[in-house]
Image (spheres, rainbow, N blue to C red):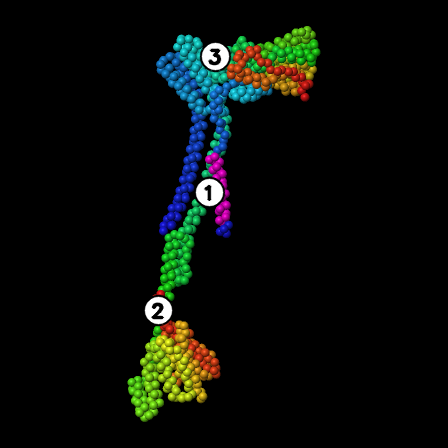
Amino acid sequence: MRKVGLIFLIIICIFLSYLTFTTAEKVFHSDWKLPAAASQKENSFRIVLITQELDTPFWDKVGKGAEQQAQRNGASLEVWGSYGKNQDDFLKKLEIAIQSKVDGIIVQGLDTDRFKELTKVKAAFYGIPIITVGNDVPKAESLRKTYVGSNQHLAGVMIAKLMLSDMGQEGQVILLSDSQKEFYQEQRLSGIKEVLQSFPNVETIYSETPEAREQVIAKTRDLLNQYPEADGFIAVNANMAGAMIQEIGRRGQVEPYFIYSFDDGSESMTLLNQKKLDGVIEQSPEMMGRKSVDVLMQWLKNETVPLDANGYSSEIRMIKAMDER
Amino acid sequence: MNRIQKKIWMLASVVLIIMAIIWIALTYYNQKTQNQYNDILQRYLSMNEVTSTSQKVVTDLNNYLLEPSENHLGKLDKSKDKLNMAKLEIGKLRNSKNEFALMNYMNLIDSFIETTDRSLMFYAESDTETSNKEFTEATRLSKYISEMTLTLIDTELKTYDVFYRGIIDQSAEFKKLGIWLMLLITLLLLVITYWFSLSITRPVQQLTRAANELSAGKFDKEIKVESNDEISFLAQTFNRMRININNLFQEIQQKAQLEHELQQNKLLLQESQLKNLQSQINPHFLFNTLNTLSKKAYLEGSEETSDLLVSVAGLLRYNLKWLDKSVTLQDEVMVIQQYMNIQKARFTDRLTLHLDIDHSCLEVQIPGLTLQPIIENAVIYAVEPREEGGQIWLRIKDGENMVKIEVEDDGPGISEDIRIQILEGERIETNSASTGIGFVNVVKRLRLFYGMENLMDIQSDIGIGTKVVIRIPKTRGVEQHAQTLNR
């Protein structure tokens, strides 16, 4: 009896000490990984990539490519930007970047005065090189060092040719563009028009609308009413494709129409996979990101001065809905 | 010998050590968390400091631009200094996660200061418009700084999220630790105290039990206490006392026994003396008469009668004289020869005495009249009743520590009952044929004289004879006893 009691007591003692020591260990031993101390890379360049459309597949790819390249070059890069083409936000980010005296800015071109003022005056004042990516702004107006991205004129040419090959050499084509005439859209339009001019049987209807979804829908409705015979649509601003197709789909079948756009819209690839878009001009966003960082680093390291003002074109190719799966 | 005190000290120090350990651990933990909290707070405070000072700079700048005075300029300079200080503080917060943002932040502050400087400069040059433009920009930058501060704090929160949660978890664990620790210590202290108290009370209990037994008179049980403190010392002392008392007790008992024996001895002596006195008329008259008779017999030519009378007179004198004293064996042998002379006169040829004496043993002390009654007994029982007479052997031999005296006769022998009765000293002699001192008296006296039993042995076979063997120690028994006592 006494022995049993003793063993019982010992077991309780051991049990309690075990609990005590494990909790004591938890209390006095912490293994949270605090962020490592600053890496003190004195000559690590700080680069900011600023876009207007964060969280879209296209710009995500650009950011990814840029980050990969930055890592390879030992530069630190951050992707900033606005969501859904919020210009004020975008410009604010750009200004902050300039005032923060980053070493280089890679920016999605925006064809506005404020943008140009910032790049031309502020960035130049602090001596910060600016490279446009994806969308260009003319060098004279922005003092950008160079442009990395697709040749938008060529893209326009390609999309026009793609449509002609599908639709044939006659028909009514509606070009839907942004009322805020951005440089890259102008370039695309000029490419498209250049091709279509030589086909007299192809009637081109050019239309402009603000980018807001409701307005795009309204405009599409107007156009469909006005031109019931229309055969093809080209969304020059790829972000309009979704709203446009939605409105067309409400009227009737989407399939009979020949609808084309570019891949830098947030819905472009989804629509293509659903075969609502008949073709898309695919650019190389990742390559753009990589190349832009690469070029910027070359400039920063004084390896290539000056940069090619005309820009570095990235690959573009056509994708037809049939090709996809 | 201050073991109990030591034990108490030990218990107290164990408790003290436990308390000290807990106190140190608590203080350590407290200090640690305090430091953590301070660090965390410091981070947020210094970020917030930037926001507030930058706003202060804008306000001061505005005040100065509205009303340019030394006072306002001084304030502006002061707040700019403060902002610079805050910037330096911010620089310390760099880590790999916020390096980029923090660098931007600090540059933004620089830009902000530069812009304010520019605004001041243009103002000094009376270029109010540009100055105002710069002021607007400074205001905007200050706003950006505030926003960026928030972003930074947000990042900070995300980065340190795990850390903060860790702290919260830790404090929860700490509560648990407190409970477990309290339980453990309570249990341990209970156990230790129990053992400790037992180590004091158990010996006391043992001692109490021993004392009880002692008081009940059990002196022969050893007092044993399993302890190494004062109690054990007490127990040892107690035990020694017990042994002493025990010894004293035995001594008293022995003394009492001895006294008792002495008393008996005296009684026996008195009895034999009385018997003597009864048969004593006037010894001198009797001796003189016997001597006169002896002379007369000699003168009348009866030499034999004369000798016999001398023997009787000698025997009588010896009888009266030596009874209460020890004599040598030599004296005893002489008396026996005289006695035998007398008996020979009576039994003539019927009695034959064979003496076989080792003369080296004759110096041994024995009680007076020891052998004579035995010889007399042999004469009475072995010779007197038989017409053909009998033979008696007296042998004195040297043993190792003993002198062996044998008296043998070839008489009818005695039965076993009688033999035992004689040896036990129970037989009451009624035969008046003896000289007065009986066999049993001899047995008892021997026993008292030497303080030993079994000094006498009787071997007897019916029809063949009886043999009485007496072993006399060469040193007296009482002396031996005294020697043991003195040891």
Instruction: Single out the mark in the foreground, 2 or 3.
Output: 2
Residue B379 image offset from top left, x and y in percent: 41, 84
Q: Which residue is mark 3?
A: A125
Cα separation between marks 1 and 3: 71 Å
Q: Are marks 1 and 3 on the same chain?
A: no
**Does any portion of residue A230 appear in the rendered image?**
no
Q: Which badge, 1 or 2, comes first in the chain's sequence?
A: 1
In the image, the segment drawn in magenta is A5-29
Mark 3 Cα within 10 Å, few/some/many (few <14, many 20+)? few
> Which image quadrant is residue B223 in?
bottom left
Cα separation between marks 2 and 3: 134 Å
Q: Secondary structure at mark 3?
A: helix
Q: Which residue is mark 1?
A: B184
Query: Per the image, is B206 magenta?
Result: no
Q: Residue at x 58, y 15 (%)?
A: A149
Identify the subunit bearing mark 3: A
**In front of the other: A315 or B479:** B479
In the image as oriented, which residue stretches furthest toward the bottom? B300
Please determine whether, in this image, residue B261 is positioned above or below residue A230: below
Q: Say the numbered circle drawn on residue B482.
A: 2
Residue A20 image offset from top left, x and y in percent: 48, 40
Q: Secondary structure at mark 2?
A: helix
Identify the subunit bearing mark 1: B
